[in-house]
Image (cartoon, rainbow, N blue to C red):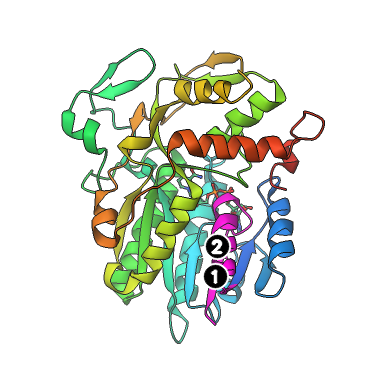
Amino acid sequence: MSWALVTGGAGFIGTNLADRLLAEGQRVRVLDNLSRPGVERNLEWLRERHRDRLEVMIGDLCEPAVAAGAVRGVESVFHLAAQVAVTTSLEDPVLDFDVNLVGTLNVLEAARRQARPPAVIFTSTNKVYGGLEDVELEDTGRRYEPLAESIRRRGISEQRPLDFCTPYGCSKGAADQYVLDYAKSYGLRTAVFRMSCIYGPHQCGNEDQGWVAHFALRALEGEPITLYGDGRQVRDVLFVDDLVDAFLLLRENVDSLGGRAYNIGGGPGNAVSLLEVIERIGELGSEPAVEFGPWRQGDQRYYVTDTRQFGRDTGWRPRVSAEEGIERLYSWLRDRSVGGRVARAATAA
Ligand SMILES: NC(=O)c1ccc[n+]([C@@H]2O[C@H](COP(=O)([O-])OP(=O)(O)OC[C@H]3O[C@@H](n4cnc5c(N)ncnc54)[C@H](O)[C@@H]3O)[C@@H](O)[C@H]2O)c1
């Protein structure tokens, strides 16, 4: 039976990935330091469902010995643990650097030192392409749209030059480059997903990261939502089950696709503005009040993924529409509300 390590496995994406791997009969080691509030509930949920094949390590990847212990004996590593918020990276760039860059280097070194190095799959971000200020946009009232027909139809591809901005963009971008270089310099089987906005069950969304879940929670709590900017910024949202499919395909094909970075997101068919997501949440039951704040540093007005390269290489395509996925997330959160109130710490239950 094969062993997989999921770093950050108590987090939103890690929990969904670990659950799928375990359900398929694989053994999974989860390494997490539980620094994200609420994720301990995800771990309880995983433990209840998969007692036998799940091994849990609580530890910090910034310590090389922890990374070495976590990687020992596994065939594949899904490296998800991270400082995940641009806002926090601006407040504490040193912490962000340590977790995202030093932590990743510790994972790579631990992998390289194994007698049989595991495949390493890394979760990078669309932020490596910077603010995309040169993409000319028109304001259609509810959302921004690119003037260039090619970007409107296809989105942003891997050909886009890297342009790191904000400490989070720099630390994730540098880690992304190290992961790719370990394929070149040391022959490791590594690959990178540069991910757009992912959403779904087990997301402990808050104002700093995980905005679709955060909006739905605020609506269920009857609390107002603060939109930073005008709410017309556009993202292509990807339901987490589709991302997990992509992870499994990437790992299955890592011998031939190793050393590559792919852009992954919902694609032009699942591009939504923040205002449109709020509208959709309103249709599902609770119309949230909206307040506006200043634009946030590094916030792209428009980011939509061109997913065609990964589709061509593996046959993958997203299956869950934004409309359906938001309803699934909303119902999941509502079912966990207690007396009409959704305790944030309980959202992962
Ligand atoms: N969710 C998204 O939309 C999105 C988009 C682009 C990229 N990503 C990347 O995907 C990955 C997973 O994101 P997520 O949304 O599941 O976030 P998450 O915060 O839910 O999960 C991250 C997990 O890592 C753990 N962690 C943090 N620092 C650690 C450390 N030093 N050692 C061990 N564990 C540590 C946290 O406790 C948490 O459980 C991250 O690398 C993130 O940068 C996410």
Ligand 1 has an atom within 8 Å of the beta carbon of the residue at disc 2: no
Q: Residue at x 49, y 62 (%)?
A: 79
Contact flag, marks 2 and 1 (Cβ < 8 Å): yes
Q: Is residue 14 magenta?
A: yes
Q: Is residue 209 visible?
A: no
Distance (Cα) linking label 2 and label 1: 6 Å
- Total marks in image: 2
Q: Residue furthest bottom?
A: 115
Q: Residue furthest left?
A: 149
Give, as a single range, the part of the protein colored magenta.
Answer: 1-27
Mark sitting on residue 24 = 1
Question: 205 and 293: which one is in front?
Answer: 205
Question: 326 and 53: which one is in front?
Answer: 326
**Left or right: 1 with respect to 332?**
left
Q: Quadrant of residue 191?
A: bottom left
Ligand 1 has an atom within 8 Å of the beta carbon of the residue at disc 1: no
- Where is residue 201 drawn, in percent x and y? 60, 45
* Residue type at the position of mark 2: Arg
The quadrant in which the N terminus is found is bottom right
* Residue type at the position of mark 1: Glu
Mark sitting on residue 20 = 2
Question: 255 and 101: which one is in front?
Answer: 255
Q: Quadrant of residue 3?
A: bottom right
Q: Residue at x 56, y 79 (%)?
A: 72
Q: Residue at x 33, y 40 (%)?
A: 267
